[in-house]
């Protein structure tokens, strides 16, 4: 009996040692595996956000639009106000650029806000080579929206003789020409039109729906109808109306929308509208919306100065006044790139005059949070994105900048 107890005791001790050894071995294996896994608790410090020259070896003459063709070529296109579009590789070491299109003889830039003001590439550009421009012309003073096509033999050269004029809009004054053109996910071309100029919208274009001024227009460039080189989308708010309203209008009541963009994740259309004398504003544009100008400037009455009727008007989601030297908003983008963790999901925009740049957190649309992130020394004429949705800035000092980490 004693011998059996001794054997049981020895077996128990052996079993215990074996269990402890296996446990230690398992701990070692787990530690080795953990060493191979990324540390999710410790964020990678990428440095501080900064504005830096994107292409130090290149300069431009009053660049005011930055686009890509969406064709996977990793090229970017810069629009110069005088009527020239340059193309080059999206590489910080690039040393030269090609002239993609030069229509300067057709472009009027007599007024400070006239010129070649917008560029948009057809969603199927890779196959059809179509792109669209918006420029100012004279005799009479007007805005011209045209389609061009790339050369059949050189992807870095447009066919300057391929112009097809889609739409012309008479301009009573030289300022407030808008100019942004973008394609929506619906395949339609959107165009931001200013109110025609002077000060205070003396002809009330913002509220006159029979005019295409002071509005966001939307046209179908893949169809032709009624003698036009485009068609009217059936769900445009005034399509087929009998009141003489411009069927091209998608939204109206805008003063001088200077840059608009679609959020690539949500499809929401953002537009920054330059103010008259008191307020700059940011709007979310919806089909048929009336954004108030010249009845209102931002959230304030303008004409009349008090007691204006706000019924049916869409108010901006954000506005700022001119008390800090800010005078002219430049619309940007909701950032959806991968490099800038701090800006993801924020609307990034700036002020042309002051050089301040902000990030608007709109996760709560009723209480957005606006944060100043930079104050640059150059005039901010436009924001742009590349094929990876990383952010760039056109400066009127002749340089293109990129937002990144330093």
Image: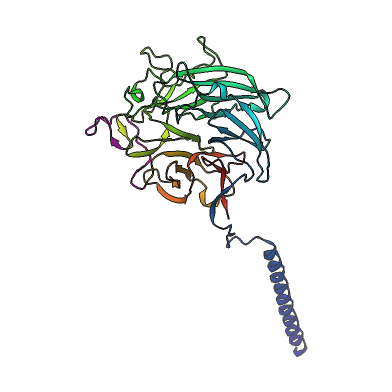
**As displayed, is residue 12 above or below residue 405?**
below
Q: Is residue 71 magenta?
A: no
**Residue depicted at x 59% and y 29%:** 84
Our reading of the magenta stretch's main secondary structure is: loop
Q: Taking the image as drawn, is residue 183 in sight?
A: no
Q: Looking at the picture, how far across and down is residue 108, in whole percent? A: 50, 24
In which quadrant of the rendered view does residue 32 lie? bottom right
**Residue depicted at x 62% and y 44%:** 55
Q: Residue furthest top?
A: 227
In which quadrant of the rendered view does residue 291 lie? top left
Nearer to us in this view, 63 or 111: 111
Q: Looking at the picture, how far across and down is residue 16, in whole percent? A: 71, 79
Direction from residue 253 to residue 46 in the image, left or right: right
* Span of residues in magenta: 299-324
Q: Taking the image as drawn, is residue 142 in sight?
A: yes
Q: Residue furthest left?
A: 307
Q: Looking at the picture, how far across and down is residue 386, in whole percent? A: 60, 39
The C terminus appears in which quarter of the rendering?
bottom right
Q: How is the image coloured?
A: rainbow
């Amino acid at each position: 009996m004693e011998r059996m107890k001794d054997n049981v005791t020895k077996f128990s001790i052996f079993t215990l040692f074996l269990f402890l050894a296996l446990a230690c071995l398992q701990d070692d294996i787990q530690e080795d595996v953990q060493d191979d896994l990324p540390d999710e608790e410790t964020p990678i410090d990428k440095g501080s956000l900064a504005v830096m020259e994107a292409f130090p070896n290149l300069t431009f003459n009053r660049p005011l639009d930055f686009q890509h063709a969406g064709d996977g070529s990793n090229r970017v296109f810069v629009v110069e106000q005088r009527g020239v579009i340059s193309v080059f590789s999206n590489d910080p070491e690039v040393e030269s650029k090609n002239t993609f299109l030069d229509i300067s003889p057709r472009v009027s830039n007599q007024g400070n806000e006239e010129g070649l003001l917008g560029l948009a590439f057809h969603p199927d550009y890779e196959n059809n080579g179509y792109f669209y421009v918006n420029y100012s012309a004279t005799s009479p003073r007007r805005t011209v929206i045209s389609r061009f096509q790339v050369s059949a033999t050189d992807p870095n050269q447009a066919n300057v003789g391929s112009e097809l004029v889609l739409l012309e809009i008479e301009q009573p004054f030289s300022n407030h020409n808008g100019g942004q053109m973008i394609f929506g996910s619906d395949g339609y071309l959107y165009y931001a039109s200013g109110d025609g100029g002077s000060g205070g919208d003396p002809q009330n274009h913002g509220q006159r729906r029979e005019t295409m001024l002071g509005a966001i227009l939307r046209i179908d460039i893949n169809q032709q109808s009624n003698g036009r080189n485009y068609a009217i989308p059936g769900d445009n708010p005034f399509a087929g109306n009998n009141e003489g309203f411009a069927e091209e209008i998608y939204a109206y009541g805008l003063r001088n929308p200077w840059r608009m963009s679609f959020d690539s994740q949500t499809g929401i259309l953002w537009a920054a509208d330059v103010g008259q004398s008191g307020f700059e504003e940011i709007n979310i544009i919806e089909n048929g919306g009336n954004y108030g100008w010249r009845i209102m400037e931002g959230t304030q009455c303008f004409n009349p100065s008090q007691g204006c009727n706000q019924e049916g008007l869409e108010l901006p989601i954000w506005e700022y006044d001119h008390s800090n030297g800010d005078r002219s908003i430049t619309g940007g983008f909701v950032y959806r790139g991968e490099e800038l963790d701090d800006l993801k999901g924020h609307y990034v925009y700036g002020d042309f005059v002051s050089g301040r740049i902000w990030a608007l957190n709109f996760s709560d649309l009723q209480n957005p949070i606006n944060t100043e992130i930079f104050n640059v020394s150059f005039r901010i004429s436009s924001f742009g994105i590349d094929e990876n949705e990383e952010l760039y800035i056109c400066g009127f000092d002749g340089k293109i900048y990129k937002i990144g980490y330093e």
